Amino acid sequence: MQIYLPIAEVSVNAFLLLGLGGLVGVLSGMFGVGGGFLMTPLLFFIGIPPAVAVATEANQIVASSFSGVLAHLRRKTVDLRMGTVLLIGGLCGAALGVVLFNYLKSMGQVDLLVKLCYVVFLGVVGGMMFFESLRAIRNTRRGAAPKRKKHGWVHGLPFKMRFRTSGLYISVIPPLLVGFFVGILAAIMGVGGGFVMVPAMIYLLGMPTKVVVGTSLFQIIFVTGFATLMHATTNFTVDMVLAVLLLVGGVVGAQIGARIGVYLKAEQLRVLLAIMVLAVCGKLAFDLLVMPAELYSLGTPGAAH
Amino acid sequence: MIRAALILLGWTVLSAQAAAETVVAGLSRDAISITTNFEGSEILIFGAVSRTAPPPPDSVLHVIVTVEGPPRPVTVRRKARRFGIWVNTDAIDVDAAPTFYAVASTSGFDLVITATEDLRQRVSIPTAIRAVGTNVGDQDSFIRALVRIRTAEDLYQFNEGAVTLRDQTLFDTSIRLPANLVEGDYRTRIFLTRDGEVIDAYSQSITVRKVGLERWIYNLAHEQPLAYGILSLAIAIAAGWLASAVFRYLRG
């Protein structure tokens, strides 16, 4: 069944969009990532104009994250206090990110920068997670007790706060910085930033994996909601019909994903997420390195040259 | 005085001769509504050649039909290898390129119209694209790329021999408009040619408009962007909550 999208001005198969939404929704519920880093390139691929894809994707992430957060709230795996601290940093970062993005756009080559950002961050984050979780799996197989509660430099900072749900008593500075940094990335790369946030929470802040997912989703709702409003009022690129189709699949998928997540061990979850992140990174790097079939591309004037 | 009258008479005869064959045409539809389930459309363009004198025996009549979507500016970028990766290096801005352009003719394009006449009437696809000179040397390769990319998307169609002409009088062709149409007036032109020269032309517009829900959403997004953004968010939150509630209910 073909559906004409009023803002994107293209006609696409409704079931394809429902399926894509569902698939990304499952991943979102399982890993606590918004799924934007997967969905946005997929939307480009099926012919949605990039500006519309980025803006609409932000709207869809709000829906799937909200659905996911509700599932996590019932299981009490959302650290609302930590989420709020991250959010404060995140909104500041996003605001700076928008300014930075416009500055880079005026300099040109913003497309390339976004792609390089993706490759570098996905590569580093995916690689780190992959090897760390493999080591963790091997250790559990051998029966070695996992090392917990390392006291590093993070624990020596002032302004300590108790995060009961996460079982942490740490300074608010590292979570604020993590939120801020992810906010910048989110604005520049046009994604929720969950794929950077989740590993940062695990490895930098030392939060338990089960709490990380819900907390990350909680923060993503607000950051992407803010992005949706920005895109809708400045660029008019949020396509409601596209968003509805994606989010119907997405919210259902997120619920299924959250259920699947319960049956998987934390290390397995991390290995799977790492593989996925590395796969997307590999695809983007491949596109940059291999000579494209069509050297020319069309764009709207006013964007980067 | 007499000489002037003779010249006037001669001119009248000549112009009557030039207009000896005129085109009378019709379209299967003059308005296209874009609805939610719009899958593209096919328009039938048909007509006849009306004559005041028998056709000249030594030349063949040809018909060219063009349909042109509203022109929009476009940037064409080219990639090149820099430091091992492929990046956009140079670009040209095309002032106005039709968002849709279809050309159909009775025979091979070279036979149907001369290059000068093509330039004058802007019939073929490259002549319909207006680009002013830029500092990039090989502007032509950018224009060719633009045509190539849009042709692959079915937005530019070049169909030699797609117009059928019966008994040098009746002609018809059908042009398929793809689903990814832009709103606006689509100019349809019909040319009659002999020996590569245009002897008559006819033009009519097809209006392409979004209607119903499509219209409403588009207008809201542009006239009330904040309300539209909040509505989009509300839908997202509601859908997220609904899915969560439904799944909780299903689980018991």
Image (cartoon, coloured by chain):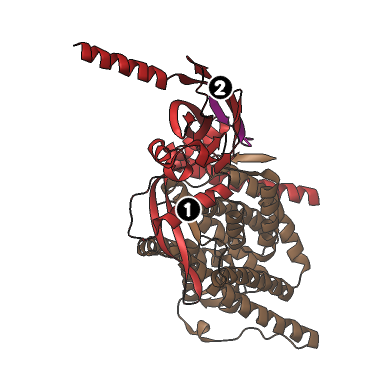
Chain colours: A brown, B red
Instruction: Point out residue A143 in the picture as x, y percentages from the top left corner.
Output: 79, 87
Q: Secondary structure at mark 1?
A: helix
Check the picture and name the quadrant holding the N terminus of chain A. Answer: top right
Instruction: Point out residue B108 in the picture as x, y percentages from the top left corner.
Output: 56, 40
Along the line of sight, the residue nearer the viewer: B114 or B76: B114
Q: Measured along the vertical axis of the image, is residue B178 above or below residue B55?
A: below
Q: Residue at x 70, y 63 (%)?
A: A30
Q: Is residue A274 visible?
A: yes
Residue at mark 2: chain? B
User: Residue A210 lies in magenta, yes or no?
Assistant: no
Tag 1: residue type? Arg
Q: Residue at x 54, y 47 (%)?
A: B233
Q: N-terminal of the two: label 1 or label 2?
A: 2
The answer for how far apart the CA atoms under marks 1 and 2 are is 32 Å
Q: Which residue is mark 2?
A: B47
Q: Secondary structure at mark 2?
A: strand
Tag 2: residue type? Gly
Q: Measured along the vertical axis of the image, is residue A235 above or below residue B8?
A: below
Magenta stretch bounds: B25-44
Q: Which residue is mark 1?
A: B144
- Rendered image quadrant of residue B158: top right
Q: Is residue B224 visible?
A: no
Along the line of sight, the residue nearer the viewer: A58 or B15: B15
